[in-house]
Image (spheres, grey):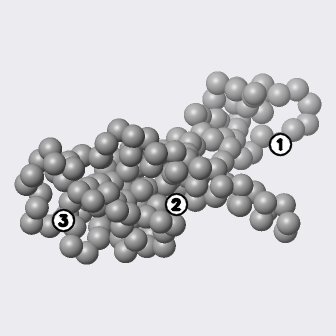
């Protein structure tokens, strides 16, 4: 619980009595651990998970993620910042969503619409971009949260064994 009111190492050194190492200083409002991002991708009409998609985190050094666990695509360690998440899958209209990461576990849902059907039959199964029924969306969000916690547990357990 150390909040010096600054992230300048020189200013922090002036506030500390005795010998200490104050670098690297954590950026103001920064997190000790980078955040994680989990994107659940499914067909907006049938609500079937899409397993052959691609999720990109634009402006970052990450390659697009194609590996997934039942339609959940993840980025394990995302530095704080503002990004655009782009989701693509063959035969579907791609989607973009803005994201501000701040050291948290973020979960995004992408109900993709088949190409050529965008805007048609709105209200029936919500193919026009809706997230589906509230119960289905809550269930999916719960699944994403559980997968996120399990992913973090795996990361930490691997670090302890090394």
**Distance of label 2 from label 1 (alpha carbons):** 31 Å
Q: Position of residue 86 (x, y in %)?
A: 32, 60
Asked if residue 146 shows in the view, the reply is: yes
Answer left or right for 111 relative to 60: left
Counting from the top left corner in percent of width and height, residue 68 is at 48, 68
Q: Position of residue 121 (x, y in %)?
A: 9, 52
Q: Nearer the viewer, mark 3 or mark 2?
A: 3
Q: Between disc 3 and disc 2, whose residue precedes?
A: 2
> Are dots 2 and 1 in contact, CB under 8 Å?
no
Give the residue drawn at x 32%, y 57%: 47
Choose the circle earlier in sequence order: 3 or 1: 1
Residue 54 lies in what quarter of the image? bottom left
Q: Residue at x 41, y 49 (%)?
A: 108
Q: Which residue is mark 2?
A: 75
Residue tagged by mark 3? 114
Q: Secondary structure at mark 3?
A: loop
Disc 1 target residue = 21
- Residue located 14% across and 44% down the image: 123
Crowding at mark 3 (Cα within 10 Å: few <14, some 14-19, many 20+) = some
Q: Residues within 10 Å of mark 1 (few under 14, many from 20)?
A: few
């Amino acid at each position: 619980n150390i909040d010096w009111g600054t992230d300048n190492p020189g200013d922090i050194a002036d506030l500390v009595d005795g010998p200490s190492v104050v670098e690297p200083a954590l950026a103001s409002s920064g997190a000790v651990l980078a955040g994680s991002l989990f994107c659940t991708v499914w067909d907006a009409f049938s609500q079937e998970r899409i397993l052959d998609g691609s999720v990109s985190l634009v402006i970052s050094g990450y390659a697009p993620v194609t590996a997934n666990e039942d339609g959940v695509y993840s980025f394990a360690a995302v530095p704080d910042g503002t990004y655009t998440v782009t989701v693509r899958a063959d035969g579907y209209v791609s989607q973009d969503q803005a994201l501000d990461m701040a050291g948290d576990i973020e979960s995004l849902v992408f109900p993709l619409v088949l190409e050529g059907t965008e805007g048609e039959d709105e209200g029936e199964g919500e193919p026009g971009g809706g997230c589906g029924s509230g119960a289905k969306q809550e269930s999916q969000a719960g699944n994403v949260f559980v997968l996120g916690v399990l992913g973090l547990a795996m990361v930490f357990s691997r670090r302890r064994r090394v």
